[in-house]
Image (cartoon, coloured by chain):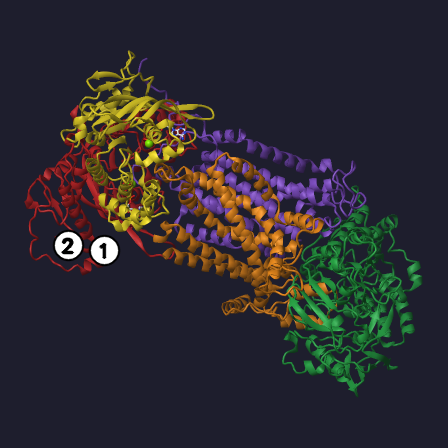
Chain colours: A green, B red, C purple, D orange, E yellow
Amino acid sequence: AANGNKAAGTDAAANASAFLTIPREDMGTFVQNFNPFAPTVNPMVQQSIYESLLIFNPAKGDTVPWLATEWEAADDGRSITFTLRDGVKWSDGQPFVAEDVAYTFELQKKLKGGFEYLDTVSAEGTNKVTFTFNKPWSPALYDVGHLTILPKHVWSALADPEKEANAKPVGTGPYTEVDSFQAQSFVLRKNPNYWQPEKQKIAGIKMLAFAGNDGANLAAANGDVDWAPQYIPNIEKTFVSKDKEHRHYWFPATGAMINWQLNTTKAPFNDVDVRKALSMAVDREQVTTIGMSGYAEPADCTGLSGNYETWKNNEVKENCSWTKLDVQKANELLDKAGYPKGADGKRTLKDGKPFEFKISVGASSSDWLSVANVIAQNLAEVGVTAKVESPDWAAVVAGYETGDFDSGIVWSANDPSPYKYFNSSMGTATVKPVGTKTFDNYHRFGDAEADALLAEFAAESDESKQKDIANKLQEEYDDAAPLVPLFSGPEWGAFNDTRFTGWPTEDNPYATLSVRSPSTVLVLTTLEPRK
Amino acid sequence: MSHSLTSPVAASTSRTPALEIRGLGKSFPIGGLFSRDSVRALHGVDLTINRGEIVALVGESGSGKSTLARCVARLEKPTRGAILIDGVDILKRDRFQASRAFRSQLQMVFQDPFGSLNPAHRIEHFLRRSLAIHGKGGGSAEETVRRLEELMTTVGLQADMLNSYPHELSGGQRQRVAIARALAVEPQVILADEPTSMLDVSVRIGVLNLMRKLRDEQGISMLYITHDLASARYLADRTAVMFAGELVEEGESLDLLSNPAHPYTQLLVSAVPDPARAGSYDPVRRAELRQAVMASTTCAFDGDPNQACSAEEPVRHQVGDPENRHWVRCHLYRPWAGAAGHALAGEPTPPGRPASNAQEKASA
Amino acid sequence: MTTAILKQPGTTAAKTPAARKPNRSFVHGILTNKKALTGMAVMLVFIALALLAPLLFPGDPSRITAMASMEPSAEHWLGTTAKGQDVLALTVHGSRSSLFVGLTVGFASTFIGILVGLASAYFGKFIDEALSLVTNVFLLLPGLPLLVILAAFLPPGLGTVILVLVITGWAGSARVLRSQALSIRSKDFVAAAVVSGERAGRIMFREILPNMASIVMGTLLACVIYGIGAQAGLEFLGLGDASTVSWGNNLFWAGNEGALLTGSWWVFVPSGVCIALVAFALALINYAVDEVTNPRLRKIKTPKDTDRSASK
Amino acid sequence: MRFILRRLGFYLIAFWASITLNFLLPRFMPGDPVSRMFARTQDRMQPEQIEALRKLLGVDDRPLWEQYIGYMTNIFTGQMGVSISRFPTPVTEVIASQIGWTLLLGGTALVIAAVVGNLLGVLAAWRRGGAIDSALPPLLVFIGSFPYFWLAMGALYLFGVVLNWFPIRHAFTAGLEPGFTWEYIGDVGAHLVLPALTIVLVSIGGWMLGMRNTMIATNSEDYITMAEAKGLRPGRIMLRYAARNAMLPSVTSFGMGLGFVVGGALLTEVVFAYPGVGYQLLNAVQGLDYPLMQGLFLTITAAVLLANFLVDILYVRLDPRVRSN
Amino acid sequence: MTISQVSFGSHEPVLDVKDLTVKYIGDTRSTTAVDRVSFSIGTGEVFGLAGESGCGKSTIANSIMRLLKDPAKIAGGSISFGGKDVLAMSPEELRRFRWQDVAMVFQSAMNSLNPVLTIGEQIVDIFTTHAGYSRKESLRRAAELLELVRIDPARLKSYPHQLSGGMRQRAVIAMAVALKPSLLILDEPTTALDVVVQQEIMAQIKELQRELGFSVLFITHDMSLMVELSHRMAVMYGGRIVETAKAQDVYTNPRHPYTQALMGAFPPLTGPRVPLTGLPDGVKFRNIPDLTEAAPGHFVAPLGADAPVIDSADLAGAAR
Ligand SMILES: Nc1ncnc2c1ncn2[C@@H]1O[C@H](COP(=O)(O)OP(=O)(O)OP(=O)(O)O)[C@@H](O)[C@H]1O
Ligand SMILES: Nc1ncnc2c1ncn2[C@@H]1O[C@H](COP(=O)(O)OP(=O)(O)OP(=O)(O)O)[C@@H](O)[C@H]1O
Ligand SMILES: [Mg+2]
Ligand SMILES: [Mg+2]
């Protein structure tokens, strides 16, 4: 029953036939739909069933060739050619060919849009695919490289691929065979035709459905699952302490930068000094300890998360001023900027109204709610009144999209390259007027200098040159403070190695412990039953 | 003392009656929102009450007595007909149910003295409200208090009871308060719906005597509803008999009860226990009467051509001396059967009675 | 021994032993009922706590004051949460929102219930049909699912919670009050009031309503219990107003922070027990009201009402 | 018969009302599901994707009445649309896979609570002041005062986690093949114990007290005295005369109780991750899955209405007075 | 004249009630509902008990059947039935005594029939419990019983609400005589009914009594009815008997002022109208002494020296 896994824990033979059990914390139930185009894609579809051309591992910052063995960008930055791996087969035995790649992109563009920079995808022979762009576009590599590839021979036969349930998926991944599917669990068994059979050491993957963290955490604490990728409060006590020998966690700061965004179309947030002063008033240590249980890395003035460690401009980072707690400076700055403190210790705006605004957070994000509460508490110290508002996420996002909000806690883009991050935080092209919907630059900040740098970056395919440009972008960011970066989101992840070993750790960061990232398949192909 | 037993003004029929009911009909819808069924509780009731006259309305349970009273008091909306007070049709005059002008002309005393006084208020409240609503309280507070005390004395209660709550009073006392409340308005007509049936036997007569006193001293007209024939005879100048929503017989009380003409009245009279006639129960006679009553129930509604009754509305027959204003409405009544009113005399049905009832049925 | 026929002074009780106003005997009954006293004592404690909360625990109760997840100690009588907030302060402050919502919902639902019930009963006919239809429909719609959906749709905040609870809670009280009002409506004293020329409003509120005191009180208590419980449920589901400190939110956070997982029972227990205690206390008062107004439920009986109906 | 027809009419109106309510509610909502999903995937979606999704999901700008007509026709042709969070699974399919569990959990809990509660109530009233009558009511009322979810969490933690007596989640052990095997049925039973127990514990007091009070009222009816006068055996009087009559109000509240049990089941399901419709409803609400939410609410409502209708029919069987008019 | 009237007083009494005192114990105060009441009923005799609401009539009836519920307590006196001490019976004896020896017809037929069981089932219950008949046999007998009270035996399948008030009351009477008890208690059996129906029911009871020869304890507040029906009667006031005699004697010559008031409450249906007086409102009798024999077989509670206080206003009104 519930504790079946624990009982089986010591037996090597049992381990060999055991399934790697993983909870999915935000799906109360599963439906047998393994379509990658579904709005809510079933777990493991893009990790263990379908594979991508290459895999970027944020933990180490390296790139692992996967379905492609090598790739080459044209000098003008207008095309990339991938050489596909030989001997890869689909799980139904058909060979994996360049046509599959071309078809996948065609289908993707048709059904989901995106890739608007992509001009053509052409298969050359069976193992070469060339992507040509309509402009020099260096960020394309990971964009293209991370899309999971579908078999043309299966999908082209479908009348309406988008509505297809794809109950028996055909993929190139290590575990593709759906078994004992039930509303709250299913199993993926070995792909009989996997291209690296020696790496399919576990018998299969079992997914369990949970409607919230609570249930998943309970399962983890109870030892019912092997992998716990969700946020576990007080993990030392709730999880690790129950079996110190086998239970471990590792939270590399490779997640997206979590920002406190201020609506820069509104006064006083249009004033850079105000943004910096408010940022200085925030105690990021407290934010991370309380809001994120101390597992997040406080942000610096580059605005870049731990994911971009190699991109960071050390000068900016070291001379950072406005992301460090300094209540006195914050006060001075605000005084100077013309927001005087009244007798009651509360500041007023230039129009004489009290310095008051709202921080919006979706009600379901309890961790961020705590963050917002801490910020509000911090701000009180500098005489600014912030009220935390927590409607449903939909309402919050609707406000963000139309520009109808004061401030809020938001995530940010987290690509292998920082282009998108800077583009969406400072690119003028992404700024839409209030009332018109935008989907990335909610805080509506544009900077002409950044625009030029961004264009330059996109055209540059050489990574070291890209880094130079990125350094300048960071200086710009440091100047303008378009956002108030708070902390790099940690990539939550914990595991129980009673039954399976070979987990990524800080010492062996071959992947993160995420179950939803492209690097997940690296873990799946490394784990082996405990002997 | 016997003068009090007949009304001093009863004979003055020339004046406009205090209350006149014409062709009153009432049907209740039954079932829910979507039901069109209805039950007919009253049908073409004509009744006149003269000034200073007490008319008793008797009939079995469910015959429509209370419905009549409630319609006249406008607690229910009559389906058709007219109600005239002082010759004015008040249904036309006052569209509003709660018209105060109308309320000050007609008051009602209810059957259950335990239910008709709100337990949440003191006695004073009831009387004071009645006075206040109709502006009968006089100009000053003292005047009102005087009126209150006067009312209490009129109904034979002590003024210090004004401060009591209803539950502190006996049934008879409560009924007196109810009467006082009606009197406060100085109405012309009081409808009393079985005012004594819930009272302890020993105090019933007291209340009846009070009603009589009011008629004699204040000339108030009353409709006395009861199923107790003996008390109707004791109190009322005239008695009307109601049966299945219709008036079937009416006359001077003494005459009506000694010469009942309608089989139903006869049945009623014979059923009243009377020690003086102990052992008079005659099952054979009873069966005949029942039969006749059953027949007369159906005749108004769906006349059977084989019956003496027909579907035609029966006409009123004068019974006995016109002085007694005694009439009956029944197909079975044969005036030639004599003053004894033996309606069931076995005369053959006069030939040539129209047997077709189709159109009557439709109108019913 | 002599037989005397005595004329009783009018003020002497003829039928019932207590020559008191019925409402006063109700109050007296409540005040001498053990259940009611226990319930009221508990409620008083909570109301006092709610009122005194800002004095007892000044400042923001959700402020982080100490180390996380500390067991109860002399400094923090009920320990601290995973965030390091003082559980006692949260609990005491929580009573404010919970009681406020409960009472507001209770009064609002009862008020609507009274209006609907009285109008339904007094006007009857079409108005009654329509109002009862609406009431019954609301009564049948499954409450919590509706609550969840409503709460998800309306902008969050205490106002929404209250509104949603009133929307789903009024029907119950309306039904009870209507049937009571209906039975009073059919009493002759209402007809008597009509006959004496009273206006509708006055009859409804002065004649009918005072006779429903105990039922009104009963529904009020039931609605308060409903309000407190449903608010807690909503908040537990994360559909409440997360920015207020209330018992439901305390439990939501407790769940969120894995209080039970970490064995921090002290975070989880107090708010739940408080909800239960308040609901229990109100239920006790409610049962006492029942007992006082319905002597049959009591052990001791009073003389029965003599109602011999002459007509069926 | 007429009574039944009238009730049927009422339920149809109630159903229509809930359909309409159901239609209107989501339209009051600020924001739309696509933005919401966007929020959840934390920027892993392109604007074009979002637009495409929007079109796909029929979140359109047609006038309200047009949408209403479309909606009504869909309902009456049994189409409740396609679940957004489970796209492209039809809502009906999602619900069908879960309603059974709710019926099992809610039904079991309701039947146990009602039967046991009523029996206790009968006994308590019959032996006024006896052990059952004095000890149980306050205890049960106190337990009943706890919120469902609190008791559920407590039970989960105590009996599931600490003592490890019962499974702590789901309706049956993941991976077990559903079928009419003892293993499966036993497993389902074991998974049912804690959730059902919490619902029973919270709701039983109400049943017991309700029954006790009507029973006490019934006990002073003349026909009980008459039955005693007839010299009938006490057991017979208690069951055939007193309980049989006192049961009638209980039958009506059984229907009403259903609504509450559905609610209680919702909270309990959430705590135990029990795959019922309540649990799914919360998921749908959190995922802003309009069609699913609507479908669930409608299904729950329809089920409650249907159950009430059945209870009405039962009532007619039980109370001859209603039967004849 | 029936047998019992002839044999009145000459036979061994069926029921003998001596000094019966019943109290209702309240939390604050207790009421003595029945106070030292003694009477006996002979075989085949119809004994009437009159008096207004709340004077203790039903309490006496219930004491005889030992049906008094909780706050009521028999505080003294004895009840013996055919020589057996009713108050000393064990529960099982009592169960058998009920209905076999004494049966009772309650005030309201509607309320004394179980609304959810058919008339037939309720009659069958009696036979199966007491006579041990099979269901079929019981049903046959039930049909006979209904015929006895002139109800169509097809009505066995009817539920109480499907019968008219009169039929229900008759059905109850049928049940009461099912086991041919030697005493039938009628507690206001017709108050809820129409005069017409009332008379038929009373005639029916008389007929049955003639046929089956049981004694009757007849309780009512309707003096006319009582006098018409019973051989001997007692008038109660405030828990005490104030007068007892042959019914005709009480009718023609009431001696106690309360009895006189009761008689006055029923105006005659024949003869001239004569003014009547009832008992004035609020008039109470206190400390009623034991009965004394005022005339042969006519017992009255003597009036004391203090003259009765009579409300002048009322009497004046009535006398005019
Ligand atoms: N509100 C109502 N709805 C439907 N039917 C009604 C209503 N009120 C009275 N009736 C019907 O009208 C008929 C007359 O009733 P009503 O109360 O007038 O009789 P009654 O002569 O006063 O009887 P009782 O002597 O018992 O008081 C009855 O058949 C009754 O069922
Ligand atoms: N359950 C009770 N608790 C307290 N007192 C009671 C109870 N039942 C009856 N009494 C009192 O006992 C007295 C006698 O009641 P009982 O029912 O015998 O009167 P009754 O003569 O049968 O009246 P009625 O004509 O109304 O039936 C009354 O004063 C009544 O108040
Ligand atoms: Mg009437
Ligand atoms: Mg009695």
Secondary structure at numbered mark 1: loop
Q: Nearer the viewer, mark 1 or mark 2?
A: 2
Q: Is mark 1 within 8 Å of ligand 1?
A: no
Picture quadrant of residue B327: top left
Picture quadrant of residue A22: bottom right
Secondary structure at numbered mark 2: loop
- Quadrant including the C terminus of chain A: bottom right
The reply, left or right, for residue D204 in relation to residue A377 is left
Residue A38 x %, y %: 67, 71
The numbered mark at residue B310 is 2
Q: Residue at x 33, y 57 (%)?
A: B36
Q: What residue did someone put label 1 on? A: B364
The reply, left or right, for residue A29 in relation to residue E220 is right
**A468 above or below B102?**
below
- The foreground one among B164 and A121 is A121
- Quadrant including the N terminus of chain A: bottom right
- The foreground one among C156 and B274 is B274
Residue D242 x %, y %: 42, 42
- Mark 1 vs mark 2: tell me if same chain: yes
Chain label for disc 2: B
